[in-house]
Amino acid sequence: MLGWNGGNAGKGWSWVGVAVGAGLLACGSLQSSAALQGKKKTSKKSVTFEAKPDFARDVKGFTAKFCVKCHADFPKSLSSAESAVAHADLLAEILRKVSTAQMPPQGEAMPTQQQRQHLADWINIATAVSCKLAEPGRVTMRRLNREEYNNSVRDLFGVDLRPADEFPGDDVGNGFDNMGETLSISPLLMEKYISAAEKVAERVIELPYRLRMHLPAASFGGKLTSMLGTDAIVYSNSTAASPVRIVRSGQYRYKVRVYGQQAGPEVVKATISMDGQALKTFDLPNKKDHPMDLEFILNQNSGVHQFEVAFLNDFYEASLPEDRRDRNLAIVGGDVEGPLDSLHTRSQSHRKVIPYDPTEQTEESDARKMLAAFASKAYRKPASTEDVDRLMTVYNVAKKTGEEFERRIQLAVTAILISPRFLYRIEAERPGVRALTGYELASRLSYFIWSSTPDDELMNLAKSDKLQDQAILAAQVKRMVADPRGHALTDNFAGQWLNLRLLNVVTPDPQKNADWNDNLKNAMVTETKMFFDGVRTQNRSVLEFISGGYSYLNETLAKHYKIAGVSGPEFRKVEMTSPTRAGVLTQGSILTLTSNPTRTSPVKRGKWILEQILGTPPPPPPPGIPALQETAPTDITLSVRKRLEMHRKNPACATCHSVMDQLGFGMENFDPTGVWRDSADGSPIDASGVLPTGSKFTGPADLRGILLKDKALFVRNLADRMLTYSLGRGTTKNDKCAVDAIVKTVASDGYKFSTLVTSIVLSDPFRKRQGETTTKP
Amino acid sequence: MSQHIDRRTFLRGAGAAVALPILEAMIPSSVMAQSVPAALRPVRMGFLFVPNGMSMPHWTPTAEGSTFELPSVLQPLAGVRNSMNVLTGLAQHNAFELGDGPGDHARSAAAWLTGVHPKKTAGDDIHLGISVDQLAAQRNGKLTRFASLEIGCERGAQAGNCDSGYSCAYTSSISWRGERTPVAKEVNPRAVFERLFGDGKDQVSIKRRDFFRQSILDVVLDDASKLRGQLGHRDQNKLDEYFTCVREIEQRLARFESENAAFAMAAGHRPDGIPADFAEHIRLMGDMMVLAFQADLTRVCSFMFANDGNNRNYKEIGVSDGHHEVSHHGTDASKLEAKKKIDTFHVEQLAYILGKMNSIKEVDGHTLLDNSMIVYGAGISDGDRHNHDDLPVLFAGKAGGAVVTGRHIRYAPNTPMTNLYVSMLDRVGIHGEKLGDSTGSLPGLF
């Protein structure tokens, strides 16, 4: 992670500042002061100004004075307040550059803070979008990412093969790896798609298999067995066994041909067994000229089995003539054949594609039916006749070259898994704004909540056009969030929202963090994931992410945290007795991933809070200043706090660092891997901080109180992050109304997790789609 | 059920048995260069990138020309000193902020092979330009089984934005097929090996597999073109990526059918996966590049030792702070020392790779290194200043005899690094190109 790792910083547009009371913690003087004036107000109309925004003064006057000298191409059409919407992008850019003091450049005439403020206010107001006109936005066709590919294959075939683990990493945009615009395909990935499709199809669909194996006498071995000619002779009451490798479970026919070397009063007796289990005992009166065939039909699992022949009644009398002196059992040979019941022994995965074995007369039409059914699942909408024709082309090419039915289907399934209809989530282009079709909605839902393909229930609702019904939709969300597949939200949404995945690339210094190892790291990840999972599955308040006074620990982690009374490797819920640890903020995972290898970084921790919790990323520092480092070149022996204080003396840095550093100080009692400490490098820890608003705090509990003062700020950020994740595109000012509504609904329902997910799903950006062209009214 | 011998056993056995003669026999006739004028011999291009700048005082030789002493970071290269040139004074102007504020790590990686200023975004609208390796691949790629190879030791980032509001696509990709398409790299040496040499299937089954692949690809291309008509422009652009990739693989099938089983035999050792040891990881990936060049499976390779901004510690050499952190040395002596150690460590791995290339004799009697152009360096000069002029650039190999090596060449400050690329492209028959901010070819090298 770099010094200026911006959560939303690249968005270039922040309506958060003007819309809600972000002033409490937002950094960047312009946004915060604008917000302070609009504090506690939630709509643009109620924002108050020192002076009424005025186009002539705030924009025209400003640009004439500070911009056009260099930007001679400044658009003439930006001539009135009404023209602002048409120039929204340009205005956003101006806002970003001017409010972060990147423009005007050094050495030119400088506007006052107030002038900058007026310009910002005017732009924010003028480009705000009326909720009635808000457009739902358009998502670029999304390629399945690695997780989605793995899960889709798992849910299509019912077997977790994880083929995408071999794929190259997916690029991240807007903080997530499921953004339509960012996900691309390279020849390398295409190669991997092809070989993954082949491997999956070959693994799942079983080719006809018939074992016909002869077991020659010599294959029957035993302590007291020896060969006589081509026969195996078993003597002295011993057992001879032939090993048989069964590759596919099923019913097998075993045969063994035996005879006796007869002597004494009894005929030869033998017991046939399989893996030590006696099957049957025989009297064998036969002699060499008329051997006897013993036959068994057995159900066997795959693996190596011992087919055993035991000789029971040894007889030897030296005084008798040679041909009547010695009784022995002789084996001529054996045979194994099977499986006899191939119909019943196909795996469930195989049956998901080939539910029954067709006869030769019906195989062509059966293949069509099977491919149509499977392609409809894989494509997440009914396969057209044309789609099936295409698959049948592959089928027939294979048939012509003499491949068996199952192999033909295998190849057609390979084609399905390489088809863009499987690899991309496609929504048809139509002009204007439209509601998504049931199938499109089913896909959006299942990839949002499960990172996987829709199940039968969703597909059936889509088929009967019921999914657009809001009550049914809401019920589905409830079901899906509680479903085990909903864990994908934890892995993929929380894993990225909270930056958990970055824990894999941090490398705490083993000398300073003695107990750091993979085991501890994994325990930290598990803790945070179980915490998120608890809120998800028990439908708890999302505010618990900040304040929940419990966690999930095993012995490793509890020891690390110095919490007594937790033993064993399994995780369990532990109520925190001290107020120091609560919510995700003070979990080892977050504290470690925001630290440097050898020491804590209040800047990184503060920045993490601003970005991931509050959604008010610090703006980039002014030009000419390299990414912030915490070390002043002068004196390395100073404490981190001291060095940061020096750094903040530079007014260009002070605005943001006065927020970031202070927030980070609140967590200084946690060392680089999240262990509580009262002192560091011989000095006691000072975990106090003062925010620009004057709020003072000491330690993590106080800090959490401040974070929770403005619940809407946190919930808005969480809603914005989750909406981004659910849509696969960055949010824009057009989504503001939807986010406002989501925040309101969530707040009115006890901040419940499922309400958050439901209100996202019911929002316009999620349920609707905007075409590239508008229809003429 | 197909039955096959355990592949590793097979490869080991076969590799030991056949050794080199087979390899020479398998080299396409185009490489049999003795009868071919030097100018037409295949010349390989490798671009090896390291993050977070360089200890410039210990990198740049004091003297110019051929009598320079190797500074301490470059000392591991003593064995190949006379097969390389140190180039000083080159710059990537477009990696500078140019009004975009911080984000030098992202820009340095993005501009390194493109010479283009990346659009500042962490969101949907990444925008850069084609990189020199991909340009070479697009023009000359049809001559070899693989147009190009993109490898590295660190996957693209898994979460968050990577640098001051720049997408992770910039910090983790130096290879770009076009303005909006970074090329993902392969980080697992085993996967590279299998990609290059196949997965050990016999020739007959590969032929059969390729036959079916061909008919499947025909069908999905038809599928995709039907689909295209139902999409808006942005989606069509996405689908076009799909088309391009499928076609590239189709051509590969048509061009070369199932030769690779034999290559695999000769290539011998197949790596197990990503080794825990970082040096070993770099070396194994280097081995893969060398093998691919040696067998003429590709002539273009980009290789990121790590993504820019990487903050791993190097405890294997006694550096417990993160690389990015120490690169911001603030003139602190211990950080400067740590940075020097890391830089030297990377150069040691480079020395292994170049040494290996120098030990491989090609059929024209020259070494593989002689017949290559390997660029090694960082997109940032000083890690603390984040400047992108005076870049550390090493140019190894003789480009098939076109380059006099063993020199330290100092260029005028701010000479575009892309001019070097233009000259390299020229050397492989791609003439008159402009790449990023290039202003012409680079004098004095070729």
Image (cartoon, coloured by chain):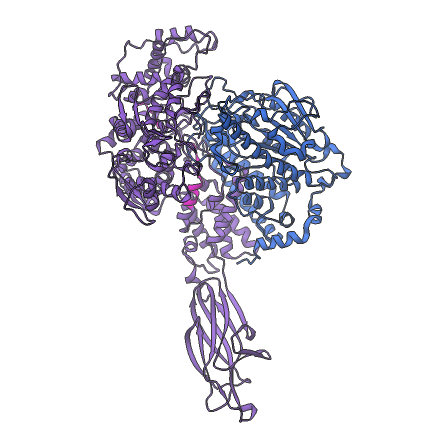
Q: Residue furthest right?
A: B35
Give residue B365's quadrant in the image: top right
Front-lying residue, A773 or B342: B342
Residue A121 sits above or below residue B432 on the image: above
**Percent from the top left, x then y, of residue A279?**
41, 75
Q: Which residues are magenta?
A: A130-152
**Percent from the top left, x then y, of residue A729?**
40, 30
Q: Is residue A35 visible?
A: yes
Give residue B160's quadrant in the image: top left
- Left or right: residue B175 versus residue A565 is right
Residue A467: within the magenta? no
Give residue B81's quadrant in the image: top right
**Percent from the top left, x then y, of residue A27?**
34, 20
Front-lying residue, B77 or A142: B77
Residue A131: within the magenta? yes
Chain B colour is blue
The overriding secondary structure of the stretch rendered in magenta is loop
Which quarter of the figure is the N terminus of chain A placed in?
top left
Which quarter of the figure is the C terminus of chain A placed in?
top left
Front-lying residue, B348 or A439: B348
Q: Residue furthest front?
A: A682
- Left or right: residue A513 versus residue A389 is left
Front-lying residue, A221 or B237: A221
- Left or right: residue A90 versus residue A751 is right
Shown in purple, the chain is A
Q: Is residue A486 visible?
A: no
